[in-house]
Image (cartoon, rainbow, N blue to C red):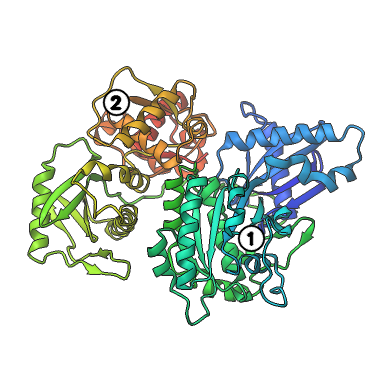
Amino acid sequence: MIHNVLLIGKDQGNVVVRTRFWKINFEDQDIAEFTRGYGDLITTEGLAPDTPVFVAEKHKVFHSEVDGEMLLLFVTDGRDEDRVIQYKVREGAARISTALRGNSMGYIRDNLDEILGELIFTRFKVSFVGSGGVGKSTLLRLLFGREPAPGGYTPTINVAVDSSETIQFGTFLVTVWDFAGQAVFQDLWSFYFSGTDVIFLVTDSSFRNVMQTKSLLRNIRKEAPAVPLFIIANKQDLPESMKAEKIKRLLGAPTFQMIATDKTRREEFIRLMLEVAAKTVGVTLPELPISEMITVRRGPEEIEQPGQKASETQASGWDRVPDSIEEDIGEITAMSGGKTTQTKGSSTSTTTTKTATTTTTVDSELVAEVVPDRTQILHLMLIIHQDGIPDVAYHLNYADEDIDKNAIASLISALDSFGGIDGRSSDDGTSTTNALETIEHEGNLVMIEKSKHFLMALIVTNKNEEEEQRRTLNSLLLGIEQKYHNIWDTWDGDLAVFETSMFDVIAELPLKPVSFDYIVRAREAGRPLPFNSREVGKAVVEVKSAIESNETVGGLVRSLDIPREIVIGCLQLMNKYGWIDFKVELGPTSILKKIGVVDEDIEKAYGAVVVKFVDLCDGATSLEDVVRKLNVSLPAMKFVATKLVLDGTLEIIA
């Protein structure tokens, strides 16, 4: 994510223009460190001149020359795809160069946001709809930092004035549309919903209005079937208001409680909008408290910042939101077919700077850090338990080892029937358990989690990561229960209907790590996929058809109107069954990190030096520096490193 943009002098590093979009500081000493790093970059043979520079172990700075005298800097948190930001900064430098023809530098300072436009900002259209008097306009006044309108309810006629305003959250430009839900205006909905990224349907939480809202919801689904929709249960302070959880069950959509007249709820509301925006358009918010990262503007006017008391923010945060934001937003995004993109954590550098005037110090010694053996996942099964008879909905084979899945399912079901699995019901009708610590099966361990309709079994090699893996299984089961909560009355026993949840599982427990930088190559033939769902088959065919015109995984994700997790899941399945191959391109400056242990066959083939090499890949040291430490051939070790990346022993950090 781009959080700061600067235009600096190429030689001296003096700041010409500086704009901070998120409350993440890039200080003068950071600029000094970048200048030194850039100087080293352009004098080092073999490095591309636009190679990003790492600063203070947390900033990844992309740069491009402007007229040979200045540098345009895009300062990021390192989680974006390099090629995307490199294109943006080059295009931004070209735009500034063009704007300088006939204009002064003052013009650039005053109009930088407009010049860079979509290179920096993500535009996002939000539509608020609901019956008259439910509090839509009051909710927007809360967002704008205004007092509730005096004199009580004033009907919104057609589209309110506020709809023409754009609110800036960091690098989000959110256009808010507030229009009436009365029947006389519903003929205009198809026009107003055009281009909408998300719909907030507001109810006043009374039983009568919730029933009216249910009717509105049906009409909205007809006009905008693919748009993510959330319910705002307003006026929760009134005695006759229904609880948000009950409204969620009645309307079948993620529901969040709200009191629009309560100014203390403003930060909560802003956080909800940000999370929705991030999930829907496929970006990642910075890992900071809301009060530290938000800059809200309505047009040119800066709005009072939320969460002025940091201690209150950190103490309360999301505590007032009744449901899990991540689960509900993730579910609704997947249902809508919206394309989401998640990128991994930022890279780090061993270069540190104490002040702007001190000498840069670099770690001269490479130290091997021992990484504990990771648990290897062998198999995962989703089991339906209906009337005491276990049915395996699907089986994911991580290790290519044969297994009698039905025998294991029967064993688990038998243990459950004798009280071995103690599923404890929760308020939302699901249940979870960790009563069975382990079951041993042929020298491996089986973890089991249970919900209302499903059992999930994970077979692993050891207990080193049991707590984390149980949390993952628990979360997956809750999401799967929600995904299929309305099918049980009409379910005909077809297990294939549950196979689409496989993409949710693979997103959390991947069959193979896949990077956006991987190159994808189709193979002539592969083994049949052991799945029966038409939806799964359709997704696989669509992804495979797009491979010919896209070289990288990142390009494939961007070209398809399919959620990112489904594209990545299809690629993992096709690779598993021999339909495609992955390749990676490593260079001398590639930075690798150990995430697994060296396979015995690899060690036998290439020698013990491979183990030492993997241990030295710490996520901060370049490939050429690691090779230099070991005194081995760079071309030979680059070949081995490529294989280790594809095998999941190493991952590419940068």
Name the residue at the bottom extreme. Answer: 239
Q: CA distance from mark 2 to mark 1?
A: 45 Å
The answer to whether residue 482 is seen in the rendering is: yes
Q: How many marks?
A: 2
Residue 34 drawn at (x, y percent): 69, 45
Q: Residues within 10 Å of mark 1 (few under 14, many from 20)?
A: some
The mark found on residue 293 in the picture is: 1
The answer to whether residue 77 is seen in the rendering is: no
Secondary structure of residue under mark 1:
helix
Residue 512 drawn at (x, y percent): 34, 38
Above or below residue 133? Residue 108 is: above
| Near-viewer residue (132 or 284) | 132
Q: Is residue 17 left or right of residue 562?
A: right
What residue is disc 2 on?
578
Secondary structure of residue under mark 2:
loop
Residue 609 found in image quarter: top left
Residue 151 drawn at (x, y percent): 71, 78
Q: Residues within 10 Å of mark 2 (few under 14, many from 20)?
A: some
For image coordinates 19% across by 66% down, the residue present is 435
Report the amino acid beneath label 1. Answer: Met
Residue 621 drawn at (x, y percent): 51, 41
